[in-house]
Amino acid sequence: INAEYMGLSGHTGPVTSVHFHPTSNILASGSWDKTIRLWLMFSTDRSNESYETLTLASEVMQLCFSNSGHELSAVTMTGQLEFFDSRDPKQITVARAGLDVRRDIQGGYRADEK
């Protein structure tokens, strides 16, 4: 197989999550550098630069596109669930504070929750 490797550069910390857009050639990557980068995977200009960078308040742990591909969500190290509009990559203002999911990502119950 004659496959050409093209590295993606831009993150300044470890990449913790990558996810392909379900209907287009976009790849999203999240990192401990507190950014999400969007990449055009099959661009003809052969650039390895991201075309959009989204900055968060905390390190990205996981990200995922919705089934329609219209939204991108990210869970941060502080337990916030953040939402973005992938058609116009700006944070959706309704969810600007995000959702606190710290209790959802911790295992088990506390003694006072029984």
Image: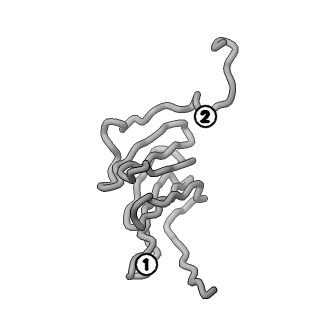
Of 67 and 60, the residue lying toward us: 67
Q: Which amino acid type is marked by label 2? A: Ile
Q: Earlier in the sequence, mark 1 or mark 2?
A: 1
Label 1 close to label 2 by CB (< 8 Å): no
Circle 1 residue: 47
Q: Residue at x 49, y 37 (%)?
A: 80
Q: Is residue 46 left or right of residue 103?
A: left
Q: Which amino acid type is marked by label 1? A: Ser
- Which quarter of the image is occupied by the N terminus? bottom right
- Which quarter of the image is occupied by the C terminus? top right
Colour option used: one colour
What is the CA distance from the residue labelled 1 to the residue labelled 2?
Answer: 37 Å
Task: Find residue 90 and report its horizontal and vertical position in percent.
Answer: 32, 51
Of 76 and 113, the residue lying toward us: 113
Under circle 2, the secondary element is: helix
Task: Find residue 83 and report its horizontal and vertical position in percent.
Answer: 40, 43
Q: Is residue 98 left or right of residue 101?
A: left
Q: Residue at x 47, y 63 (%)?
A: 27
Tell me if residue 60 comes above or below residue 18 in the rendering.
Answer: above
Q: Is residue 52 left or right of residue 30?
A: left
Marking on residue 105 = 2
Residue placed furthest toward the bottom: 2
Task: Find residue 57 and report its horizontal and vertical position in percent.
Answer: 46, 44
Q: Residue at x 43, y 50 (%)?
A: 67
Q: Residue at x 54, y 78 (%)?
A: 6
Mark 2 packing: few (<14 Cα in 10 Å), some, or many (20+)? Answer: few
